[in-house]
Image (cartoon, helix red, strand yellow):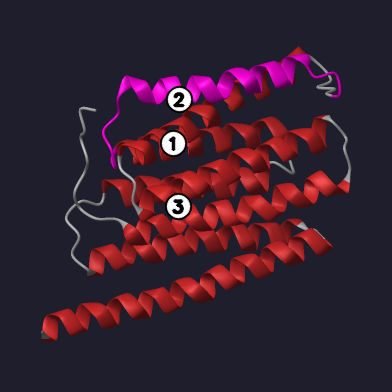
């Protein structure tokens, strides 16, 4: 009973820390939308990495035996932070860092539910409409073939990541997989808005939608670490 009370207290303490950090990220998001500035962006991105790190520490304190998912998720969050900052300086380098982050997210999701080829089917099903959208919609001006290829490759990587999240949730419906799925979809939507803003020149509205969905996406992915359990699902269905 005493041990149960101690664990409950520890969980509450870390939930309070989560709440304050999430509020800080959302406040930073609002500040960046309103005022802009690379400093505000960097600090806000740093907070979701701290959120993921704190939840990893929670699992370590809780003596969790399987830390592969949370560690790889944290690496993905770090690359997302770097991509977020570098994107304003060099678009292709920022996109590359984000893409690497998505690869780590995909690997992390595969430690929740073991990879199956059907995961790629979901990813390709998401990618094909994205490919048609990028190549056929006339509003885009990529300024050259190289940038268009970069956007297509990036779309493939993020589509596979979202597809894996969707596949995981279909195979095992629980809170963690739901948060991962929503976070992944918000990430995808945010990048779609970024594409429309940078190469479609659709104005402030899509820029706001991009930022208003990006940081909540990272919050959900970072918080999913808190919900991690040691068991890994390996379903045959």
Q: Is residue 9 left or right of residue 161?
A: left
Question: Which residue: 64% across, 37% down?
Answer: 94
Identify the secondary structure beneath mark 2.
helix
The answer to whether residue 19 is visible is yes
Locate residue 92: give its quadrant: top right
Q: Position of residue 148 (x, y in %)?
A: 72, 19
The answer to if 116 sits in the magenta stretch is yes
Q: Are marks 1 and 2 in contact (CB under 8 Å)?
A: yes
Cα–Cα gap, marks 3 and 2? 18 Å
Mark carried by residue 179: 3
The answer to whether residue 90 is visible is no
Does label 1 or label 2 sit earlier along the sequence?
A: 2
Mark carried by residue 122: 2
Identify the secondary structure beneath mark 3.
helix
Q: On the image, numbered disc 1 is attached to which residue? A: 166
Label 3 environment density (alpha carbons within 10 Å; few <14, some 14–19, many ≥20)? many
Does label 3 or label 2 sit earlier along the sequence?
A: 2
Q: Are marks 3 and 2 in contact (CB under 8 Å)?
A: no
Q: Position of residue 25 (x, y in %)?
A: 60, 65
């Amino acid at each position: 009973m005493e041990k149960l009370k101690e664990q409950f207290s520890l969980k509450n303490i870390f939930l309070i820390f989560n709440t304050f950090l999430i509020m800080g990220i959302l406040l930073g998001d609002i500040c960046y939308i309103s005022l802009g500035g690379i400093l505000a962006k960097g600090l806000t991105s740093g907070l979701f990495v701290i959120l993921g790190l704190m939840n990893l520490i929670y699992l370590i304190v809780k003596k969790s035996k399987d830390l592969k998912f949370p560690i790889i998720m944290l690496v993905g969050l770090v690359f997302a932070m770097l991509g977020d900052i570098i994107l304003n300086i060099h678009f292709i380098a920022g996109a590359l860092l984000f893409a690497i982050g998505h690869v780590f997210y995909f690997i992390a999701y595969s430690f929740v539910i073991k990879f199956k080829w059907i995961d790629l089917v979901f990813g390709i099903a998401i990618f094909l409409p994205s490919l048609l959208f990028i190549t056929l919609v006339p509003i885009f001006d990529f300024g050259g073939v190289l940038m268009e290829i970069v956007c297509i490759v990036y779309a493939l990587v993020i589509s596979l990541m979202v597809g894996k999240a969707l596949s995981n949730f279909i195979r095992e419906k629980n809170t963690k997989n739901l948060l991962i799925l929503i976070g992944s979809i918000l990430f995808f939507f945010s990048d779609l808005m970024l594409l429309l803003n940078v190469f479609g020149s659709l104005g402030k509205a899509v820029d706001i939608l991009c930022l208003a969905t990006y940081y909540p996406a990272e919050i959900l992915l970072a918080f999913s670490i808190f919900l991690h359990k040691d068991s890994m699902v390996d379903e045959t269905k």
